[in-house]
Amino acid sequence: KINSSMLFELQQSEPKPATEGGSEEKQKDEAEKQPEPDADEDDQAPSKPMKFRLLSDEELDSINKKKLQCDITLLEESLAQMKPDMRAIAEYREKHKEFLQRVGHLEQITAQKNDARKSYDGLRKKRLDEFMAGFFTITIK
């Protein structure tokens, strides 16, 4: 029986140096030939990046092929079940447009309120100035 922690065991394991004797050029050539994982394909990427490396014959013999096949089957089944709900995305976009319209309307109303407040403050200041001028005239007499 395979549990979910075993699924990413191979991807998260640290690469081991090659045990075969050989020149640095051969190892560099092999490293260049190794495919790199595509980051866009996996939304639930493991915490460590996946590294591909060439395995020696001993390592290939030690791998449990049935376990790997089971892992592949489980991953394929989970991938088949991962279908995004496009209606939810469309609904989000619609709500976002509505939100932006409301924000625009709020900005217009806020501008009107600020204009009305400036007008009110101007009238209050004018009234106070006229009152003070009248008060000053009465006080002088």
Image: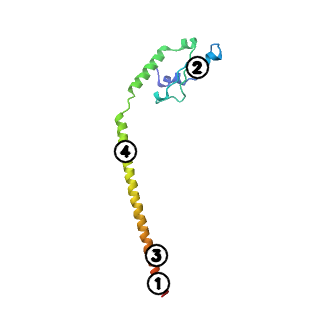
Q: How far, Cα to Cα, is label 3 from label 1?
A: 12 Å
Comes first in the chain, label 2 or label 1: 2
Question: What amino acid is at disc 3?
Answer: Asp
Comes first in the chain, label 3 or label 1: 3
Comes first in the chain, label 3 or label 2: 2
CB atoms of marks 4 and 3 within 8 Å: no
| Residue position for label 1 | 137
Element type where label 2 sits in the image: helix
| Label drawn at residue 129 | 3
Image coords of residue 128 (percent x, y): 45, 75
| Label drawn at residue 97 | 4
The residue sitting at 41% across, 58% down in the picture is 111
Residue 115, by quadrant, is: bottom left
Badge 4: residue crowd in 10 Å (few <14, some 14–19, many ≥20):
few
CB atoms of marks 4 and 2 within 8 Å: no
Q: Is residue 27 above or below residue 137?
A: above
The residue sitting at 39% across, 60% down in the picture is 112
Depth check, front residue: 44 or 103: 103
CB atoms of marks 2 and 1 within 8 Å: no
| Label drawn at residue 48 | none
Image coords of residue 127 (percent x, y): 42, 74
| Residue position for label 2 | 31
Q: How far, Cα to Cα, is label 1 from label 4?
A: 60 Å
